[in-house]
Image (spheres, rainbow, N blue to C red):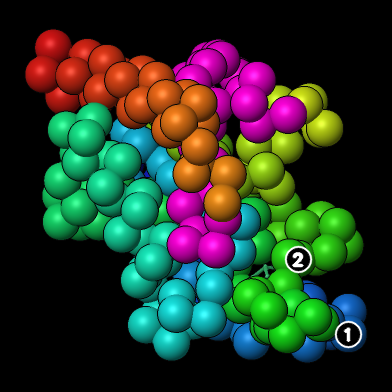
Amino acid sequence: MSDTRQQALDELHQQLQTCRLCLEAGYDIYPRAIFSGQLGARLMVIGQAPGITEKEAGRPFNAGSGSRLFRWLAEAGVEEGWFRSTQYMTSVTKCYPGRARSGSGDRVPSPAEQRLCRQYLEAEIALLNPALILPGGRLTIGLFYPLGQPLDEIIGTQKQVDGRWVVPLPHPSGASRWHQSAENRERVRQAVTLIATHVNGMFNP
Ligand code: SF4
């Protein structure tokens, strides 16, 4: 059974590595899917899309966004090396979407690109069957919470979706200012406490 799932995951990763759907649809993306992890992962982090530093390093949550994400996870008792080598990291769209038109920061993938890539995220979730999903940022949180609901009402909460726990986090990018206020830092602290409780239950029962 696990051999079959391993084969299915290998095939999915191969499909991702050769996918050119967004290019064929006319989007000027850099066609190299960025994700990491393997079967057996109980935790899945889902970001928006790789940024320029992820594209250059070829690994998810590199540099600024990674250091903030792993600072939060460390506060929940999750060590970066362990997480990177045993758990799963992916994003709503897997290829670097390029710079924003304004020239400041990376472009947010369009709804059409999100739709094109959605099949892969759904397959990853179905195959990995994670017990806890951590969506980072508004675009990813919108997969699990009503669109338009303010982050202030979401961060620090959790919900069950299809039998798994979802604990949302703000976008960990250094460009995001959301988590700078004392109120929002407290909301992130509540989210970290929820993650710690799940992790303790899963790995130190
Ligand atoms: S972002 Fe997703 S759908 Fe688009 S080319 Fe990359 S892997 Fe394919």
Crowd rating for badge 2 (residues with CA inside 10 Å; few <14, some 14–19, many 20+): many
- Please give left or right for residue 120 compared with residue 46 in the image: right
- Please give left or right for residue 148 compared with residue 203 in the image: right
Judge: label 2 CB < 8 Å from ligand 1: yes
Q: Disc 2 designates what residue?
A: 109
Q: Nearer the viewer, mark 1 or mark 2?
A: 2
Confirm whether residue 46 shows in the render: no
Asked where in the image residue 194 lies, by quadrant, the reply is top left
Quadrant of the drawing holding the C terminus: top left
Q: Amino acid at mark 1?
A: Gly
Q: Looking at the image, is 107 positioned above or below residue 160?
A: below
Tell me which secondary structure the magenta stretch mostly adopts: loop
Query: Residue 156 in magenta?
Result: yes
Q: Looking at the image, is 110 positioned above or below residue 25?
A: above
Magenta span: 150-176
Percent position (x, y) of residue 11? 49, 64
Number of numbered discs present?
2
Q: Disc 1 designates what residue?
A: 26
Rendered-image quarter of ligand 1 = bottom right
